[in-house]
Image: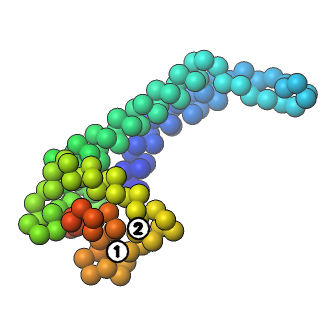
Amino acid sequence: LVDVLAALAPWLVAGPFAYLTADRGVDIFGEPSIMTTPAGDWAVLAALAVQVVLWVANRWVLQGRTGRSVGKRVLGLRLADQRTGVVPGAGRTIGRELAHVLDWPGSLGFLWPLWDPLTQTFADKVSSTVVVRER
C-alpha cells in the first residue's frame, strides 16, 4: 500500500491542475460539461509517465538491488531468496512483479500468505522469494 501511494503522488498535482484548468460549458444537449484543456491533458500524461518511472525505480531497481522498496523499508521488511536469504536481484524481482498477475484473480494470491507457512504470495512461490522482517 505504501508503494502504491508513493507511485500515485504525481496525481495529487496533475488531477487538481487538470480540473482547475478545464473548460466548463454546455454540451449539445444543454447539459453542463467539463472538457480538459491541452495543458490539463499534458499534466495527466506527465503524471502517468512520472508514476511509471517511480514504480520502476522503486519496485524494480531499488528492490532489485537492496531487497527493499520504499514500502518495505518503512515496514522493516526485505525481499529475499527463499533458499539463500540474499537479495534475489533485479531480474528475479522484475519476474516476481510480473508474476503478481497470478495473485489478482479473486485476490486469492494476495490472501494466500495468511495461511501459507512461509507467508508467500503466488508470485513469491513462482520466483522462489520470501519477504522477511529486517533485524
Mark-to-mark CA distance, 1 and 2: 7 Å
**Taking the image as drawn, is residue 134 in sight?**
no
Q: Residue furthest top?
A: 38
Contact check, label 1 and label 2, Cβ < 8 Å: yes
Whether residue 11 sits left or right of residue 21 in the image: it is left
Image coordinates of residue 73 in percent, x first then y, are 24, 55
Please tell me in which quadrant of the rendered image residue 20 appears: top right
> Is the N terminus in the top left, top right, bottom left or bottom right quadrant?
bottom left
Task: Residue type at mark 2: give it.
Answer: Phe
Question: Mark 1 — residue?
Answer: 113
- Residue 98 vertical position relative to residue 45 in the rendered view, above or below: below
Whether residue 85 sits left or right of residue 90 in the image: it is left
Image coordinates of residue 86 in percent, x first then y, are 10, 60
Q: How many marks?
A: 2
Q: Secondary structure at mark 2?
A: helix
The structure residue drawn at horizontal position 32% and vertical position 53%, both measured from the top left corner, is 97
Q: Which mark is residue 103?
A: none
Please tell me in which quadrant of the rendered image residue 29 appears: top right
Question: Mark 2 — residue?
Answer: 110
- Residue 92 vertical position relative to residue 28 in the rendered view, above or below: below
Image coordinates of residue 58 in percent, x first then y, are 29, 44
Please tell me in which quadrant of the rendered image residue 79 appears: bottom left
- Crowding near the residue tagged with mark 2, few <14, some 14–19, many ≥20 C-alpha atoms within 10 Å: some
